[in-house]
Image: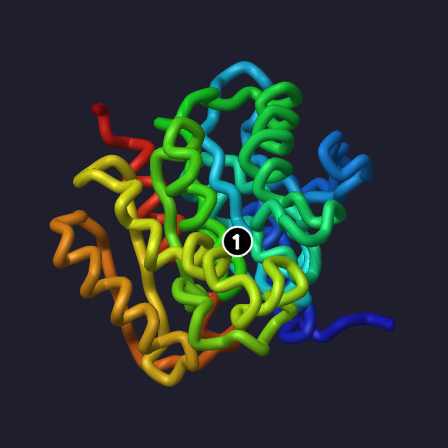
Amino acid sequence: MKLSSLAAKALLLAVAGLLYISAARAAHTDTVETFSAVMNKKIKAVVITPEGYDGKKEYPVVYLLHGYSDSYSGWVKKATGVQDAADRYNMLIVCPDGGYSSWYWNSPVDPAFQYETYVAKELVTWVDGRYKTIRNRKGRAITGLSMGGHGALYLALRHQDVFGAAGSMSGGVDIRPFPNNWDMAKRLGTYAEQPGRWEANTVINMLHLLTPNALALVIDCGTEDFFYKVNEQLHAQLLYRNIPHDYYTRPGAHNWAYWTGAVQHQLLFMHNFFKTKV
């Protein structure tokens, strides 16, 4: 069957559009299998390498953490534009599996949940051993959403020798108002029985670990989010302690519509951090 001139032109435009989209998304996305010695198990992760990655030039890395009940594939399946950002900013993006409810702690209750050690030590060592990366804190950043926003700040505060920049999107930055939620009691024990653990492992109580400019920090939360109030309080505490940070709020709830936009601002912030010469 012959195509009309108009149909032929439409087909050519469609093919050109597909080729453009393909070229625009040249980043390579791999699902890899890592091993955690501390938990004695294999753990998957997504690694996004930018167009032109050839194993010669050293690249910065952003570790991008998922939220409660999600997995390593959440960011690439549910948020558009993450792969594009790897190309745009010439960075590696690593999306680890943090367990459905680890909160990225080393649980004192459950030896099967030792995700602080896994992400901040074992995974970083694995990535640096298999990819051409900048192998110091000036070339590493970490951010995440919800449980992962808490996790990113928690890990960066406790491992400032590993990460130079940290961010949080809609993060659970103070866990204490939510003692019955998201399996946190399974990781720490109940708040009623183990108040010391909850007080010591909530991000807002860890700011004493920071000195001004020790970490580049970016925090955001939607104004309709149930974590909005605790993020406002974290922002106030950082201001009180004279800790420089970027803080953004805008209309939005605890959902992928918000995070799809938020991650672009976070990755731009990390890119600008990587460009600084300090």
Nearer to us in this view, 106 or 92 = 106
Nearer to us in this view, 119 or 251 = 119
Rendered residue at 40%/63% (across/down): 173
| Secondary element at image label 1 | helix
- Percent across and percent down for residue 99 are 69, 55
Residue that extends furthest to the front in the rendered view of this protein: 193
Q: Callout 1, which amino acid?
A: Val
Residue that extends furthest to the right in the rendered view of this protein: 1
Rendered residue at 28%/49% (across/down): 207
In this picture the colour scheme is rainbow
Q: Is residue 246 left or right of residue 11?
A: left
- Vertical placement of residue 109 versus 77, above or below: above
Circle 1 residue: 82
Residue that extends furthest to the top in the rendered view of this protein: 56
Which quadrant holds the N terminus? Answer: bottom right
Can the viewer see residue 259 in this picture? Answer: yes
Q: Is residue 67 left or right of residue 225?
A: right
- Percent across and percent down for residue 236 are 19, 65
Nearer to us in this view, 124 or 240 = 240
- Percent across and percent down for residue 137 are 39, 27
Rendered residue at 52%/43% (across/down): 63
Residue 181, quarter of picture? bottom right
